[in-house]
Image: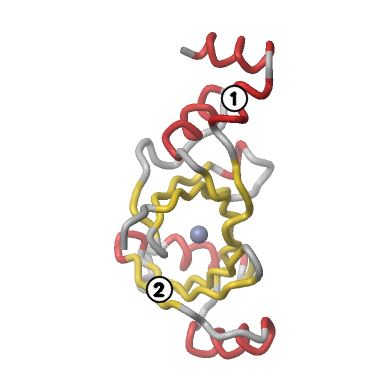
Amino acid sequence: MLLSLFSGHLSNNKIIYKNYSMNKIEHIGIAVKNLETSIPLYEQLLNTVCYKQEGVESEGVSTAFFAVGESKIELLEATNPDSPIAKFIAKKGEGMHHIAFDVTDIKAEMKRLQALGFELLNDTPKPGADNKWVCFLHPKTTNGVLIELCEDRGGI
Ligand code: ZN
């Protein structure tokens, strides 16, 4: 499988990129200490209203979303001290946490990136905020940037 992916890639880039694509920056995730104060701040900054607040209990986070053109800003607040967001803030302070790319077929994209040597933080897509299937890439294989892939779960 790996060989055929590579030969496809080498012989004709379009074979791979036509089927497994990063469509756009879906959102940028920003770690905050307090959503209650950060939401009005970002409403002022972006001159728009927060259109959705949602908890993702499995990740220990509360999220708030803002639309910016075709992309979004996702604010993340930790809901418990073991949350990855709590650890991030303890280590680096508030700030940019991850970049999320919209993909058409998350499983195909995960397979493509794994074959290229990128380390995935989850083996199968997991349910994320805002009706998405998500997968994260380890920052150590992406020059220190936490990358999220997300595919719309459809329905709803
Ligand atoms: Zn995200």
Cα gap from disc 2 to disc 1, whole angstroms = 36 Å
Q: Mark 1 highlights which residue?
A: 16
User: Which label sits in the foreground, 2 or 1?
Assistant: 1
Q: Position of residue 78 (x, y in %)?
A: 42, 72
Is residue 154 depicted above or below 114 in this figure?
below
Q: Is residue 152 left or right of residue 119?
A: left
Q: Is mark 1 within 8 Å of ligand 1?
A: no
Q: Amino acid at mark 2?
A: Ser
What residue is disc 2 on? 62
Compared with 21, 152 (above or below) is: below
N-terminal label among 2 and 1 = 1
> 123 above or below 36?
above
Q: Quadrant of the C terminus?
A: bottom left
Determine the secondary structure under disc 1: helix
**Quick one: label 1, few (<14), some, or many (20+) residues within 10 Å?**
some
Cβ–Cβ under 8 Å for marks 2 and 1: no
How packed is label 2: few (under 14 Cα within 10 Å), some, or many (20 or more)? many
70 to the left or right of 4: right
